[in-house]
Image (cartoon, grey):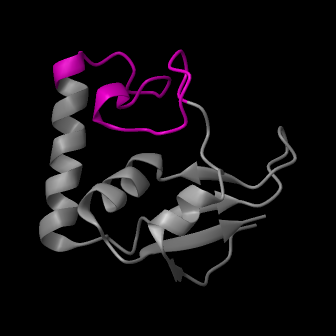
């Protein structure tokens, strides 16, 4: 079940909660330009294509802000880990931090 309410939360606060999934084969939980889309359905893209997608997303957020249709989704008490975890929006969170945005839209999923 997904909450219909969108909350506006500081991206730095979300980072401090340590709820980001580890990037496959990278020993980090920060999903940035260097490891963009590793372990996702877009993993087949070349490094240049992955970086271009990341850059395009960053420019879109820089110029248009977050699309409220795509908030960061946090799964509460994730079934595999038993912990709260970001389900969607790892790259958007990192981009928000890079851009110094004060808040990001967040939706919670149970």
Decide: is 68 above or below 81: below
Residue 47 lies in the magenta-colored region: yes
Horizontal and vertical percent for residue 17?
A: 66, 59
* Residue 71 makes an appearance in the image: no
17 relative to 48 in the view: left or right: right
100 relative to 86 in the view: left or right: left
Q: The C terminus is located in which quarter? A: bottom right
Decide: is 88 above or below 10: above
Q: The N terminus is located in which quarter? A: bottom right
**Looking at the image, which residue is at 68% across and 76% down?**
3
Horizontal and vertical percent for residue 11?
A: 46, 66
Q: Nearer the viewer, residue 74 or 15?
A: 15
> Picture quarter containing residue 22?
top right
Exactly how many numbered labels are in the figure? 0
74 relative to 66 in the view: left or right: right
The magenta stretch spans which residues?
Answer: 23-48
Decide: is 60 above or below 37: below
Horizontal and vertical percent for residue 13?
A: 55, 68
**Looking at the image, which residue is at 21% across and 53% down?**
58
Decide: is 50 above or below 16: above
Residue 95 lies in the magenta-colored region: no
Horizontal and vertical percent for residue 100?
A: 29, 67
> Picture quarter containing residue 33?
top left
**Looking at the image, which residue is at 65% across and 51% down?**
18
* Residue 78 makes an appearance in the image: yes
Q: Main secondary structure of the magenta part?
A: loop
């Amino acid at each position: 079940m997904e909450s219909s309410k969108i909350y506006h939360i500081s991206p730095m606060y979300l980072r401090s909660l340590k709820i980001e999934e580890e990037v496959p084969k990278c020993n980090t939980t920060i999903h940035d330009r260097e490891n963009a889309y590793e372990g996702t359905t877009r993993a087949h893209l070349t490094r240049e294509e992955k970086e271009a997608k990341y850059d395009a997303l960053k420019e879109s957020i820089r110029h248009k802000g977050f699309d409220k249709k795509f908030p960061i989704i946090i799964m509460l008490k994730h079934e595999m880990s038993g912990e709260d975890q970001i389900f969607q929006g790892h790259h958007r969170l990192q981009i928000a931090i890079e851009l110094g945005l004060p808040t990001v839209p967040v939706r919670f999923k149970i």
